[in-house]
Amino acid sequence: MKKNYLFTLILFIIFQAAFVPANAQVEILAPGVKKISAGVPDKFTPYGFREELPMTAALGQLPAGKLPFNINDINISVNNRGVIVKIPLDTGEQLYGFGLQFGSFDQLGLKIKPIVNDNPLNDLGYTHGPTTFYLSTKGYGILINTARYVTFYCGNTDALNDHSKAPAETHKGGNSVQELYNNDNKVSGSVLVDIPGAKGIEVFVFEGTDVKNAMQRYNLFSGGGALPAIWGLGIKYRVKADFNQEQVGKMAAYFRNNHMPCDILGLEPKWQTAAYSCSYVWNKNLFPSPNTFIDTMKNKGFHLNLWEHAFVSTASPLYEPLKTRAGNYLVWNGLVPDFADSTASSLFANYHEETFVRKGISGFKMDECDNSNIAFGSHAWSFPELSSFPSGIDGEQMHQLFGLLYEKTVFNIYKKNNLRTYLDVRASNDFASPYPSSLYSDTYDHKQYIRLIANSGFSGMNWSPEVRESNSIKDLMRRSQTAVLSAQALYNSWYLKSPPWLQINRQKNNAGELMDNASTVEADIRKLLNFRMSLIPYLYNAYADYHFKGIPPFRALVMDYPDDKKTFHISDEYMIGNSILAAPLTEKEDERIVYLPEGNWYDYNTNQKYIGGKEYTIKTELTQLPIFIKEGTILPLATPVEYVGQDTKFEITCFVYGNGQTQATLFEDDGTTFNYEKGNYNIVTLLWQKNKSIVKRSGQFKNTRYMIKKWQLIN
Amino acid sequence: MKKNYLFTLILFIIFQAAFVPANAQVEILAPGVKKISAGVPDKFTPYGFREELPMTAALGQLPAGKLPFNINDINISVNNRGVIVKIPLDTGEQLYGFGLQFGSFDQLGLKIKPIVNDNPLNDLGYTHGPTTFYLSTKGYGILINTARYVTFYCGNTDALNDHSKAPAETHKGGNSVQELYNNDNKVSGSVLVDIPGAKGIEVFVFEGTDVKNAMQRYNLFSGGGALPAIWGLGIKYRVKADFNQEQVGKMAAYFRNNHMPCDILGLEPKWQTAAYSCSYVWNKNLFPSPNTFIDTMKNKGFHLNLWEHAFVSTASPLYEPLKTRAGNYLVWNGLVPDFADSTASSLFANYHEETFVRKGISGFKMDECDNSNIAFGSHAWSFPELSSFPSGIDGEQMHQLFGLLYEKTVFNIYKKNNLRTYLDVRASNDFASPYPSSLYSDTYDHKQYIRLIANSGFSGMNWSPEVRESNSIKDLMRRSQTAVLSAQALYNSWYLKSPPWLQINRQKNNAGELMDNASTVEADIRKLLNFRMSLIPYLYNAYADYHFKGIPPFRALVMDYPDDKKTFHISDEYMIGNSILAAPLTEKEDERIVYLPEGNWYDYNTNQKYIGGKEYTIKTELTQLPIFIKEGTILPLATPVEYVGQDTKFEITCFVYGNGQTQATLFEDDGTTFNYEKGNYNIVTLLWQKNKSIVKRSGQFKNTRYMIKKWQLIN
């Protein structure tokens, strides 16, 4: 493989002068990753802020792909308005990406503006987690390295000079809006990118053999996918915003007393003396002894996560130090730290390190770092795009990067302390793969939340389809099923006194009135949460694949079945790791159509076997899991624990699906430090051959987390 | 008055050097209209394309107002990103404008992007008819002369350097999203305007005594409000898109045979050989003898209006001539004419003049000249913002100006032929007051349509709340009430075989199935349409006031009652002319709350008198009109005619509301030419004094259109 790239490199060096247009330059950045640039690129870009090093060795080991066009056919032009990039597009090609898109999935034919915003705005492209990156079914990825607001025209433009005089004919329709606007013949031979204001641009090209391979290259080039702290894969519960120390303690006791799994308790705004904007100072009225409180919680196996946003109140000790390192406009009367200035980031980080991280706070929810045009009665919030910052970054670029830089600032505190975490962040952007965060939203549309899981695999981001209150118990159960089958299983009860499974209705919940069947619903939810806890070893291994191989743990079917065109439009099913296909149901559904790709599949609940390449209508009960296991899988499921402690050992049952010989792996390490980066981990290989089980363990990690208890055959 | 301005001018000349900051320049453009500019303004701007001359004499006669701040306190800064304009904003000031805004009315505290688009996108500011112009209750207007996409922050930003350290306190709320995001203390002392990409800017300042006076100044400076052809104020009906000549003839006969008033019949796309994009060639399959057809219709008192858009099909004779004078991207395979190039406009206009206008076509519906991000399944249409045009204008600027330039191109054909018209156009922009067009939309939200009538008065545009099919007969009636109380009473039946009052359901309508009570509903609609026809003389006079005095014929209450703060937020009532207050109801309502400002008012339907300054809950039947007449009004209503012909004479009854002596005027001219611009019109003054009526007629128009038949007292 490496020879192949060396050869390519030599070829490039020889032919570069001949093939590259006057102003465009091509550079090889890593195996299979190239950059073509022209003009004077911006000073502040997503790539410019990337700190994690590319996983060069892993990149070299990936099967090499080839661009379906000559890289120099990417046309970059600079004019008075900005930069235009024109990228070849073939017929039959389908495109994905642009980050956590709410309304769209396959992007061919769309006009997309991947802009950071808290409102998806009718599928214009706005999202908490945009990327200026798309992938093609022809096996490559294109990233426009800019923090400006850009527009991608995905093959829906038709240039005058490409226009051969078409036969003159009357439009066939004309009696309905749909007929008139019918545009289906309008896929042009290029993707156009409009970058107003730029004077130059860098375009990154990720080669690949297929969508997944190209995405792996993106993730590995970004620094490898993030491996969250293992407890982060458990259940997170955010308590009511006005709870005091004692009330949080009671909630913790509720979980343990009722054997409801919970790893993380999240505190909402009022733990601080000021929020909106933030003081980052414990509110002693509610939390008289925060450090004792943290320790008590830790002893009971709870990790604490603190809500905050980055807008610094005058009431904060950070206000004075950051005053000269902030934007010239305020948000909720608070400073906007200039995270593009490493000193500002350090001041912010150091304060958090001393005040919180060293005291035992395990993570943060970094809220409101997106932007809003239209929240709540047309009242926009966040800083204006015309803001300026001492570093020189402008408000538009800062909006695109603010979440990413905030995320990086907080992540680096943990990294520095050799502690892993799992964060919540409400905005991110390109090259975010190495950050152990989940994105979330207020939009609360279950179908969109499912689509976002599929889209997360193209994004280098994790998506958390959080559960708040629900319309019905069925809604609560369906949402919970999706949550436990996602990157983060989160109940956000910031405005609920009791957990939603005791009372779904917000008013009644806060009035202390529980549902008549609360204990039945609680038991049903417990089943789902226990499944999540069982899945942790499998999930953790998928995250190790994300880190070491760049394979997204949650991803659309098209990634695993690139030759199956039926998967090209499927955004309501997704893969979890290599062996589980999830097809969640929403409130109204008792059953749904599930497309199962080639191969044989087993309904996890009934063990019924299905032949792939077909659609089936499948019923899933509220306490079951809407998942299908690929034949040839060893699915290692743990006896559920109530939380993942430092010494937790998982008792594993290996479910072998099908008759053939097969294998799977588990990733074993301390779960909470970065020592795995120095090789301090084991790969536990589970083998099933000739009707016998074999367990092999290799690596430098001295402890054992997984105890393989039994094997069970399903066929 | 004039002396006052001369004095101001002299003062300016003397003090200019002293008061104006280094880079900003102040110019007096007309009485009460000033321009402050800095940097290098764009070549292509709304003002740059203005052709109509300011009504300087009328401007000089307007009561003079004074800016509540020094014009030089308008701060213009140019940086790498673009231009920022900062305009002082006082406490207690309320703002209006930004064109035909769908979701917002009073704009203080909002972030508004007045961008041409067919989708209002959750109140971001997108609309068919944006303006970069706002008005203040302190009596002035500000216009940013740019065709770029700009953002206005209407007092919702807070600058760091204005920030006096506020007392540190916990946020009071925090248990609900509303509490957390609460931003109500965040009105800052300036309006900020973000103009990315600009290198300089011109800011126009319209002085005034109040909102109305400032708006009058804007309209007069734009060239005076448009006076539509008098028949344009009648009923317009657009027939089904696939109707042939015979079917249109039958529809015309239906109107006359059933005594349903109708002045204009509109043909939809299929009259052309190609539409989407357009050929501008009669489809002889449907219209074998178009010119005979036009004449036949004309003889029956119908004006014909042709649907088109400006994207030129290869099937069009205009394709070859315009091929080198078009944008470099196509729309629906059609050319985008470079209307910023006067030769392209002339080619387009000359063809239309010869082919249609000289043959008797009375107007056009200029569709699709807006833009769409998200129409119908995420498929955007129109040319990309990155387009370039031979004139040098870019795609973004062209989008903002395309409707306006198209409108101007078509209007100029009629002007040149000394023929008045009334057009439909789906996009417009700044300085559009002199164009006799109505804007319209597909959004079809009745409440928004009412708000748009109120907002139209701040826009220099007419708004047409067109009626298509309806959810219920009540919905149809309520929508019809609004339509007859608007700038254009339009039924758009482009996908309905029969008029909606015979069958509201689209499927049944097209299946030829009429409602059981069709004739009852028809009779009810006839009542409403007849009222519209009665109102024409009054309306026409209001339009004369628009032209000569700049007073918008349809306007928000705040314009007439600037000292009544209760009117500041009222967007569901509006004034028609000087004496009628309309308060339309929507589908669900039998009654509604109506705020009546100071003075006494009469319910038009019951003649019940109400004391102003209060809210009343008032019932309005479906066949009544939700209007209130101001005490002291002489309301001249005509005996309804079925259409307004060249020789139509209106028999007028003058309704005198109240006891005092009072007067009103009627504007009398030929109704169809621009001869009134040369003084060829009469002012008919209606006087009521000492319980006697007096009618005075002054002016150069030789004919009589109004016959004052009787007087009726209401008190």
Image (cartoon, coloured by chain):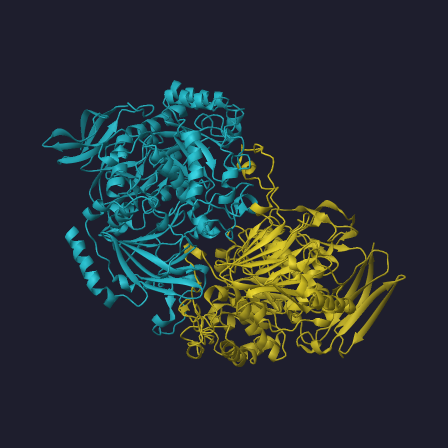
Chain colours: A cyan, B yellow
Instruction: Reply above or below: B241 against A245.
Output: below
Instruction: Reply above or below: B536 against B188.
Output: below
Q: Residue furthest top?
A: A257
The C terminus of chain A sits in image quarter: top left
Q: Residue furthest right?
A: B690
- Image-quadrant location for residue B353: bottom right
A385 horizontally vs A638: left or right: right
Q: Residue furthest left?
A: A690
- Residue A8: image location, x then y, percent: 19, 58
- Residue B267: image location, x then y, percent: 52, 69
Front residue of B700/B363: it is B700
Front residue of A262/A601: it is A262
- Image-quadrant location for residue B464: bottom right
A302 horizontally vs B631: left or right: left
- Residue A297: image location, x then y, percent: 40, 22
**Residue B42 in view here:** yes
- Residue B490: image location, x then y, percent: 59, 63
A69 horizontally vs A398: left or right: left
Instruction: Reply above or below: B701 against B567.
Output: below
